[in-house]
Amino acid sequence: MHSKPLKKTANLVRRLSRQGIEIDIITARRESALEETKTALKESGIVFDKIFINQPDKYNVIRDLNLTRYFDDQGQLIERLMKTDVADFCELTLIDVPYNQKFSCHSRFYV
């Protein structure tokens, strides 16, 4: 796993989970990285109910699960999703970091 979850993000996920909100992880990482990904998430304090791996096009998972909120730090992905029907039922939240300041989204999560 190349990226390390931000501490504030991990705290948010734990808080939401304690409130009974299902936490689903959607990642483009390849299937062979599943165990490494689970280990890295656990070590970072990220709890989750389900993980969807090898999902480069996250649109289908968001739509099929009828998610009500989706977080990502990839500004281009969030902006593409804003132009689809998932934007009508799912709040698309951009995890705000220096490299994604100019993208459209419903909301930002400041870390």
Image (cartoon, rainbow, N blue to C red):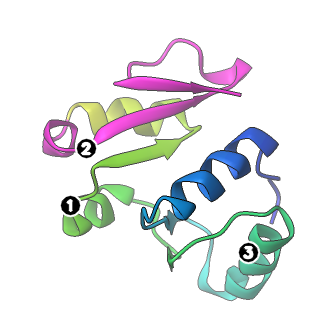
Q: Are marks 1 and 2 in contact (CB under 8 Å)?
A: yes
At a point 65% along the width and 69% down the height, the residue shown is 47
SS class, disc 1: loop
Tell me if residue 10 comes above or below residue 77 in the rendering: below
Residue 7 placed where, x, y %? 80, 44
Task: Give the class, few, some or many, for how many residues have Cα within 10 Å of label 2's Cα (few <14, many ≥20).
Answer: some
Q: CA distance from mark 3 to mark 1?
A: 24 Å
Q: Is residue 63 magenta?
A: no
Q: Is residue 20 left or right of residue 33?
A: left
- Find residue 66 and name its label: 1
Return the residue at label 2: 90
Amino acid type, residue under disc 2 in the picture = Cys
At a point 53% along the width and 43% down the height, the residue shown is 72
- Residue closest to the eye, 9 or 94: 9
Task: Give the class, few, some or many, for how many residues have Cα within 10 Å of label 3's Cα (few <14, many ≥20).
Answer: many
Amino acid type, residue under disc 3 in the picture = Thr
Disc on the earlier residue, 1 or 2: 1
Per the rendered image, the range of residues in magenta is: 84-111
Q: Is residue 2 left or right of residue 64?
A: right
- Find residue 37 and name its label: 3
